[in-house]
Image (cartoon, rainbow, N blue to C red):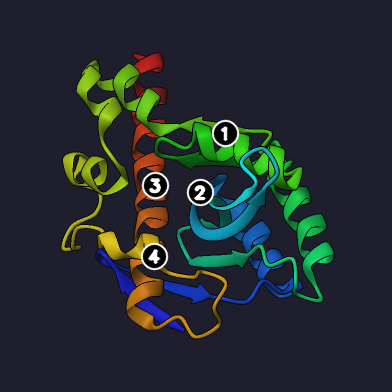
Amino acid sequence: MSTMIGKGKVKLFEDATDLSFNRLFGDAADDKVVGFDTEYSLEPKFSRDLNAHVIEKRIALVKLCTKCRCILFRLDKDNIDYVHLLKKLSALLANRDIVFVGVRKRDDLAKLRNDYGLEISNFVELSELAVSVLGKPVLGTYGARELASYLKVLRNFEPRNSTLSLINWLDNSLNREQIMCAVTDTYAAYKIGKKLLEDRSWKWLH
């Protein structure tokens, strides 16, 4: 589907096919920057230490956005293409020619590495970059939407709905509103990354 995020028209793909990866590689080869974000699902898990079932948070979606498209990758172990997806996603994230950018994602990177063996080779933490480039420590506490609003790179979007934390992101019946809310943070990260990386380059050159 095609949809509007901010002032730009972005194509959204829910299914992670080989074509999706080829499109992302094509975008990144031209632009070099990809917005990165995740969504968590809550899952019951038996704890031997506690001898009881507990609720565990695990990454259910990896979300990537370029200037042209956003793609949601479902990390569903029950999916027949799960192993193939991990191999393709691992190759994409390991590409050092692509700069992946995200806001306050250090914990997510560690969880991806520990739970799925996925590691991003070239990642820029935008909360840290914003503080470095703009010299305002408070920006390190901002989320993606707050930081995008402060930098005026993305406008006319609503605050993130708190009920999203209760959604089963592996469910194939996600509605348009849920999907749009999910990708807004990722597209915001892309726009923030483009601006801050350009501002940093200009600052170093002058």
N-term-proximal mark, 3 vs 1:
1
Looking at the picture, which amino acid does disc 4 mark?
Leu
Looking at the picture, which amino acid does disc 2 mark?
Phe
- Residue under numbered circle 2: 36
Query: 90 or 166: nearer the eye?
Result: 166
Q: Do the residues labelled 3 and 2 touch (CB within 8 Å)?
A: yes
- Residue 15 position, x and y percent, is 62, 76
- Residue under numbered circle 4: 166
Task: Point out the frontmost of discs 4 and 2.
Answer: 4
Q: Is mark 3 on a helix, strand or loop?
A: helix
- Residue under numbered circle 1: 123
| Mark 3 → mark 2, Cα distance in angstroms | 7 Å
* Mark linked to residue 189: 3
Residue at horizontal 63 percent and vertical 33 percent from the top:
122
Q: What element carries label 4?
A: helix
Q: What element carries label 1?
A: strand
| Mark 4 → mark 1, Cα distance in angstroms | 28 Å
Tell me if residue 166 comes above or below residue 150 in the rendering: below
